[in-house]
Amino acid sequence: MKRRLTIAPASDEEIDQSSLDVFGLLRRVFSYAKPHARKRNQLVALVIFRSAALPALAWAIGAIINGPIQSGNLTAILLATGGFAALAALVQFGFYFRIRHALELGEAVIHDIRNAVFEHLMRLPMSFYDRTKLGRIIGRMTSDLDAVRVGVQEIVFVSIVQVGNMIIAGALMLWCDWVLFSIMLAIVPVIWLLNRYFTRRITEDQRLGQESFSRVTATLAESVNGIRVTQGFVRQDVNADSFRELVADHSRYSLGAGNTSAIFLPLLELNSQFFIAMLLVVGGYRALDPDIARPVGDIVQFFFLSNLFFEPIKTLGSQYNNALTAMVGAERVFRLLDTKPEWTDAPDAKALPKIQGRVEFRNLSFGYDPSKPVLKAISFVAEPGRTVALVGHTGSGKTSIINLVAKMYLPTTGTLEIDGHDITRITSDSLHRQMAVVHQHSFLFDGTVLDNIRFARPDASVQMVIETARQLDCMDIIDALPKGLYTQVGEAGANLSTGQRQLVSFARALLADPRILILDEATSAIDALTESRIQRSLATLLQSRTSFVVAHRLSTIRQADLILVLDHGRIVERGTHTELLTLGEIYAGLHRHFTQSS
Ligand SMILES: Nc1ncnc2c1ncn2[C@@H]1O[C@H](COP(=O)(O)OP(=O)(O)O)[C@@H](O)[C@H]1O
Ligand SMILES: [Mg+2]
């Protein structure tokens, strides 16, 4: 049977509010505990023991008062209290393991889920990242998983113990004195209602507080990222003002939640004390009335048992909320984990053998959204070892063609073949191992220049790296860095200039020794002087492999074996530099424009 819970709309995004399959989620979270079955089973045993042991201790107190103490038998008193102390010690010893095991199990489960999510993310195709904000993914990995961790470590097992205590304490009280128990039950609805009213208000304030806090962090991140623009346009004061308002907002909600708790907790305590007073009056009467003559130990017993009975009711509200947050977190994490890639390699896809590098587009159309094609009826052949230059205005489809060659996306219609193998029938990995792409905004990972160049071939020797840089004629530029090859590039390569970053990614691509090389506006950030220097060496390097080049500088394009001129996703002209100049149309126009302006 599925239990359904209704929850408030998730604060960041998504439509999670509708319904949660509680037992399904629990089962799935705990499926990650399977490798730790021993610990899990011990934990369950400890939890059952504690559920029964706490009421037993409470009951024992009354029994000792009624028995040995009433009869005044010193030996019996010593024996009974000794037994009590031993049981108490055992319970607390078990408690230590209960806490430790729950912490370790929670940690292990989250650790495994986190790794599973990361592995899943690394395999999702580009189209997923086009749709998904980074902040959302980070939210799944941090706050959502943390809520699940709290759920496993602090909610599940505590709740089981509490419910167990409640049932056993209730049964014991009912058995000892059902009249007192019934009187006590009258107070349950009062506590329940108080709890509901206040917990709702506190939760609402906390939710608003969390939302305002994410606005604070988002604004902070944006302001720091955009600090150049902010200072450049002298917007510091304006930004600080709006930030101050957000922070004030946040304080207001936090104080609101605090104030409500400040009223709630004393009320709750007063309630318990009121109940004790009632217990003393009724219990006292029942002890003194000669017709009933309940032993005094029963009042004490009741006092301790009722504590165990009420404790869960008091904490139920906050437990419930934390449990809900954990459930929502788990639901979101599993949704991410269950995100089916829009496409994967066909199950019978073959590994591409070592290729020559012939690439053929045959009447291919493609759209990121299939209903809005950005490439239409593209047909051309890139012969092995030849260079194809793609030319066209921004948005004409140059990068899209490259994305298809790199199998980042699949064609909508038509075919794309590599050495005669349909790209949909080969494994992505085997293709990517024989291909290297240099983008306009080349991404470097935090680490040294050397690490980054060796990215695709971690086993390459330092000598090989230096050799590659020499071939590119850029070793002197790397040597000029503060620590040469061992310079830390910083987060996303922030310590290097854009041009230096691109040289590093060139070296990275060439060290990989690909059969197909793709340069997408890769030289745009390299200054003209350096470019002309590496131009010659680049030409030799391109010669032995099939290459696709998108470049703004005609010097690169001029040497291409085939130039494709794109316009709105169609090839409108094709040929060599000289052929297209002779044709005297679009390319010739571009060329004229270019030579005039430079
Ligand atoms: N990830 C994407 N999702 C949706 N549309 C895209 C995406 N990338 C590019 N486009 C669209 O596809 C068209 C071709 O873009 P692109 O191939 O990047 O052009 P170019 O590289 O020639 O500047 C443009 O209209 C662009 O808006
Ligand atoms: Mg582009």
Image (tube, rainbow, N blue to C red):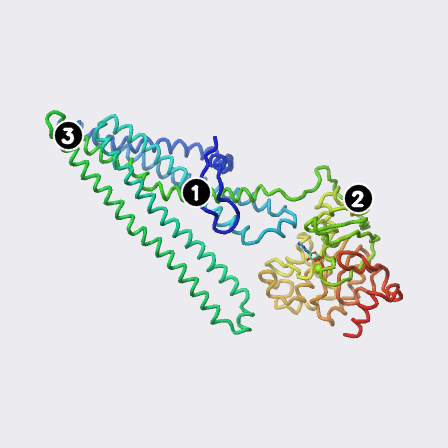
Disc 1: CA contacts within 10 A as few (<14), some (14-19) or many (>=20):
many
Q: At which x and y percent is residue 35?
A: 51, 35
The image's mark for residue 470 is none
Q: At which x and y percent is residue 559?
A: 83, 64
User: Which image quadrant is residue 97 in?
Assistant: top left
Earlier in the chain: of badge 3 and badge 1, it is 3
The image's mark for residue 421 is 2
Q: At which x and y percent is residue 174?
A: 26, 27
The image's mark for residue 324 is 1
What's the residue at 57%, 53% (across, down)?
133
Nearer the viewer's eye, disc 3 or disc 2?
3
Q: Amino acid at mark 2?
A: His
Earlier in the chain: of badge 3 and badge 2, it is 3
Cα gap from disc 1 to disc 2, whole angstroms: 51 Å
Compared to residue 96, the image places residue 564 above or below, namely below
Q: Is residue 423 visible?
A: yes
Mark 1 near ligand 1 (CB under 8 Å)?
Answer: no
Cα gap from disc 3 to disc 2, whole angstroms: 92 Å
Disc 3: CA contacts within 10 A as few (<14), some (14-19) or many (>=20):
some
Q: Are marks 3 and 2 in contact (CB under 8 Å)?
A: no
Quarter of the image containing the C terminus? bottom right
Residue, disc 3: 286
Nearer the viewer's eye, disc 1 or disc 2?
1
Q: Amino acid at mark 3?
A: Arg
